[in-house]
Image (cartoon, grey):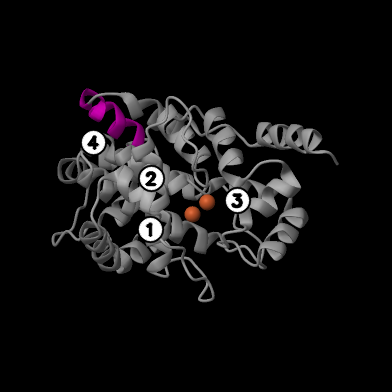
Amino acid sequence: MDSKKVIQKIYAKIEEIPTLSPFLQKIVGLVESSRTDAQDLTAVIYNDPSLTSKMLKAANSAYYGFSKEIDNLDRAVALLGFNMIRSLAMSVGLIHIFPKGKAGHFSRERLWIHSLAVATAMKEMGMKCGREEDSESLFVAGLLHDIGKVVLDQFFTEDYQQALEEAGCLESSTVCEAEINRFGMDHGGVGSILLKRWNFPELICNLVAMDHKTDVPEGVNPVDIAMLHVADILAKETGMGVSESIAPSEIRQADLETLGMTSGQIDELRVHLFEAKEGIYSFFSTVN
Ligand SMILES: [Fe+2]
Ligand SMILES: [Fe+2]
């Protein structure tokens, strides 16, 4: 099939993916909103008892490290703040959207662990690079940066298996090449089409599209892209969600320069991520 036809097929398949639940639509819609929506947000969450209980379990996981139990949503909002509650709600809701994958090359669990590690590193980098206000959006971009892999695996299972075999494994540096050969675009492109359909804010859609690209299009902050590249490598270095056989690539000097970060600051991030490891696994087990 020529690549134009494959791309049309990808769009058609993405059309088949259900739109987000009213709850998640509301949360995504609140992404650009101000704190005044906190009450609105908790009211929506309370309407979904299973989500509320999962969120409370996650809020009590080692990821956040609170010593006292958080037993209700209002207390969780007071402790975590509106932005963090919003990204927690999104994490809990989104991890469940795609049914569990089949055994084989692709482990959804591994991918989500990797994505949570990237999200954690992105958020921390946002704080360190003067992007505190966007740090939760950066977390969400990290969480969703590889969602295109799930789409390809879900709808093009056999072709995707072959692409992964060709690349060696899911995290291989040649996976994008193998995807482009078969599908005419890589998982970043596929993921951003899905997120646009789900009305995610531009910052998140653009970043996901740029996951493995180095040329910076207009309207995209090069700092955000550099953060995603570095976060992905740091997450792989910790071994979270990757197979043993994969040696992470080196952090690009150009990305460090764009970020204006020293190697000492990158070491601090490494330590942060290693320390967050247990929390990330415990967070995932509570929401899964
Ligand atoms: Fe990726
Ligand atoms: Fe990744």
Q: Nearer the viewer, mark 3 or mark 4?
A: 3
Position of residue 104 measured from the top left corner of the image (x, y, whole percent): 67, 68
Q: What amino acid type is highlighted by mark number 3?
A: Lys
* Image mark for residue 226: 2
Which residue is denoted by mark 3 in the rendering?
149
Mark 2 crowdedness (10 Å alpha carbons): few <14, some 14-19, many ≥20:
many
Position of residue 192 measured from the top left corner of the image (x, y, whole percent): 54, 36
Q: Is residue 36 above or below residue 62?
A: above
> Which residue is depicted at the point 23% across and 55% down?
262
Which residue is denoted by mark 1 in the rendering?
117
Q: What amino acid type is highlighted by mark number 2?
A: Ala
- Earlier-in-chain disc, 4 versus 1: 4
* Image mark for residue 82: 4
Q: What amino acid type is highlighted by mark number 4?
A: Phe
Position of residue 44 measured from the top left corner of the image (x, y, whole percent): 35, 32
Does the closest atom of ligand 1 sit within 8 Å of the Cβ of label 3? yes
- Magenta segment includes 38: yes
> Looking at the image, can residue 49 be seen?
no
Helix, strand, or loop for circle 3? helix
Q: Specify the quadrant that holds the N terminus.
A: top right
